[in-house]
Image (cartoon, helix red, strand yellow):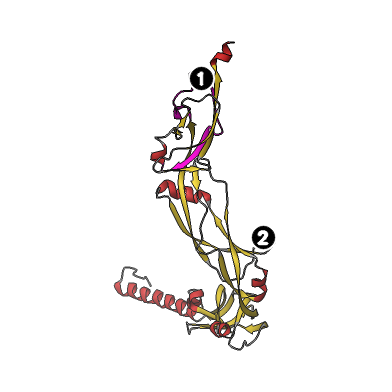
Amino acid sequence: MKIDFKNKGFTILISVFFAFIFWAFVMADSNTTRVADIRNVPVTFRGTENVIERGLVITEKSKESGTVRIEGAVNIVDYISVNNLNAYVDLNSITEPGEYEFVVNTFSNNGSVVVKSFSPSKIKVTVEEYVEKQVPVEILYDTDIPDNYWISEAKAQSDRVTITGGQSNVQKVSRAILNINTNRIIQAYEENPNHVYESSIPLVYVDENNNEVTGLNAQSSIVSIDVFSKKTVSVDVQGAIEGSPASGYSVSNIEQSVYEIDIVGKRDVLNKINSLSVEGISIAGTKTNIVSDATIKQVEGVTLVGNNTVKVSVNIRNDMENQN
């Protein structure tokens, strides 16, 4: 018998046949079960508030995540993720310091899969008394300050801080460190030269050997720092000499204790200054050497780094004696 492949009825029959085969394949696949491991499922620790209310604190946990083994239909298991799974430990039975071991409870919010196990099946928890202690705050700069900048001594919110946590860790702490990133301060100044840098910086707790102590409640402190440009300029005393020595006498030499000084201020102000003068020194009618502390003249918007005076020695000679 010859089959007419162009016959409409035959075409419909073939289509129905293949549709049935595809449906059977899908149903067979959906009825096949599969076991899968979902890794990095976080563990929730219930009852932490009650532990704190009892004057205790969790200082160590052996694990905070694990692997959940599930079983279910292939077409469902393939779409299960950590977001569909829940693992928790109940800490409400803790009433005093010590080491505890708890079973991890696990369930899925998708009722079509079965949770077979959680690995590790138990988690160890260390509990200590919750204590507090005050320690001094120390501020450290991570690198030297570039020569063309001036940074003030940093000021924290307080020179002492109260640390809290487990007794064993709190007892180790000798001080809290605020590490100042010098490059970050300079960068902030260049981007916006408002001359006041403020930032919230995390405290680092260290013991007496400068080893970091972890496991404590994290804290930060707002630090304020003044930032300015810095420049070295000359100190001019020649122009400060007023008057002339007595008749027959003259100035043989002028010496000064400081020839250069650092100044700080806004960059546009400093760019206009190359030297600073001092207050006038009178030598009118003198016959002897003069030694005087001269005050460096203040310029608006400029601050001197260091002493604001310079010792000036004006040597006077007798011209008649020199002729003889």
Number of numbered callouts drawn:
2
Residue 156: x and y, percent?
Answer: 51, 60
- Which structural element holds mark 2? loop
Residue 67: x and y, percent?
Answer: 59, 75
Which residue corresponds to the image point at 41% horizontal and 36% vertical from the top-left? 271
Relative to 51, is 197 above or below?
above
Is label 1 or label 2 in front?
1
Would residue 268 appear left or right of 62 to someone viewing this image? left
Check residue 250 in the rendering and tell me which mark sits there, or answer none: 1
- Which structural element holds mark 1? strand
Question: Is residue 212 visible to us here?
Answer: yes
Tell me the quarter of the image containing the C terminus: top right
Amino acid type at mark 2 = Asn
Question: Is residue 46 visible to us here?
Answer: no
Task: Sort mark 2 into few (<14), some (14-19) or many (20+) by Cα contacts within 10 Å.
Answer: few
- Residue bearing the label numbered 2: 210
Write down the region rendered in magenta.
Answer: 237-266
Task: Sort mark 1 into few (<14), some (14-19) or many (20+) by Cα contacts within 10 Å.
Answer: some
Residue 168: x and y, percent?
Answer: 67, 74
Which residue corresponds to the image point at 48% horizontal and 18% vertical from the top-left? 247
Is residue 259 shown in magenta?
yes
Q: Nearer the viewer, residue 14 or 112?
A: 112
Would residue 107 appear left or right of 129 to someone viewing this image? left
